[in-house]
Image: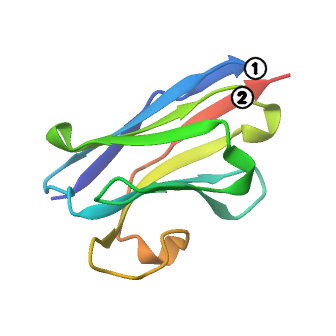
Amino acid sequence: QVQLVESGGGLVPAGGSLRLSCAASGRTFTRYTMGWFRQLPGKEREFVAAIRAIGDTYYADSVGRFTISRDNAKNTVYLQMSSLKPEDTAVYYCAVGPPYYSGAAYYTGTNYGYWGQGTQVTVSS
C-alpha cells in the first residue's frame, strides 16, 4: 500500500523558514516526478514545485523562495521554504507525478496519482 506522509509544517513568523518532508512508502518512486502543491484558504489547489527523476526542478512563479529536492535513497522529497509570507499560508501536499518517460505536464494535479494527507503551514504577519 502506497503512503505519502508529509511533515514539517507549523506556525512560523513572516520571514521565517520551514522545511517540509514527504516520505513515501510501499513503493519506490525514483523514476517518477515528485511534486508539491498547496491549497490556500478558500482557494483551489495550486502547483508549487516539482522535481523530475533526473533532478530537473520547476517552480510556480510565486515561490522563487522555495527549493525542492529529493533523496532517492530515502524515497523522500523535501521543500525548503524561506522568507515565508502570510500569503504562503496553506495546506501543503506532496504527490507522485508522471514517470520519467512521460511528457505529461508536471504542474497539473490530475497527472499525479498518489497524494499525501497534507501538512498545514501558517505564516503569521
Q: Which residue lies most toward the bottom here?
A: 103
Q: In this view, does 31 lie to the left or right of 34?
A: left
Q: The N terminus is located in which quarter?
A: bottom left
Name the N-terminal-most of marks 2 and 1. Answer: 1
- The residue sitting at 39% across, 41% down in the picture is 69
Element carrying mark 2: loop
Identify residue type, mark 2.
Answer: Leu
Residue 54 in the image: x percent, y percent? Answer: 29, 58
Residues marked 2 and 1 touching at CB (< 8 Å): yes
Up-down: is 71 above or below 4? above
46 and 65: which is toward the camera: 65
Label 1: which residue? 15
The local secondary structure at tag 1 comes to loop
Amino acid found under the numbered disc labelled 1: Gly
Is residue 102 shown above or below 106?
below
Residue found at x 69% / y 30%? 122
Q: Name the residue under label 2.
A: 84
